[in-house]
Image: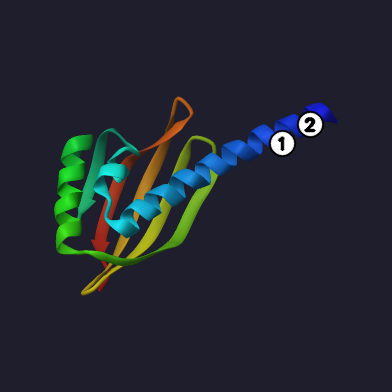
Amino acid sequence: MGMIGAMCLVMGVGFANINDVIDDIASCVRSGNTKELSKHFSSTVSMTLLNDEGIYSRVQAEIILRDFFNKHTPTDVKVAHRLDSNPNFRYVVLNLETAKDTFRVSYKLTNNDNTFEVTEFRIESIY
């Protein structure tokens, strides 16, 4: 019984960390904190920002997103969808509201040595 309890505790902590990463990233988007957001990025990120897309280094992605958030200050963020049942892959969709526009933010997290890193990040306008 003690072994089963220990395994449940370890698995619970693992799931808590997964949710923490998803919640941490949503919080960074909500506050427009690109410095903290970029800490969750892999060394390169496939990024689509409105009509522009490319593969960027962590630093380049942070600069591009900082410019976006300076133009579109977030007022609210809600998690619209999360796929977190796969041990190596996570996918999250957020609804981002700003003073003037609403955007769909989606990102893919990939497990890299037991740490989930953002490998794809998209911001699309919702019409």
Q: Is residue 41 or residue 86 the one in the foreground?
A: 41
Question: What percent of the width, then of the height, locates residue 7?
Answer: 72, 31
Indicate how the structure is coloured in the image: rainbow
Q: Quadrant of residue 40?
A: top left
Residue occupied by mark 1: 8
**Residue at (35% x, 49% y) in the render:** 107
| Quarter occupied by the C terminus | bottom left
Estimate how packed mark 2 is, as few (under 14), some (14 to 19) or many (20 or more) residues with alpha carbons within 10 Å: few
Amino acid type, mark 2:
Ile
Q: CB atoms at circles 1 and 2 under 8 Å apart? A: yes
**Relative height, residue 89 to residue 94 (above, below):** above
Horizontally, is 85 left or right of 46 in the view? right
Question: What percent of the width, then of the height, locates residue 12?
Answer: 64, 40
Q: Quadrant of residue 44?
A: top left
Amino acid type, mark 1:
Cys
**Residue at (46% x, 59% y) in the render:** 81
Residue occupied by mark 2: 4
Question: What percent of the width, then of the height, locates residue 112?
Answer: 42, 28
Horizontally, is 51 left or right of 107 in the view? left
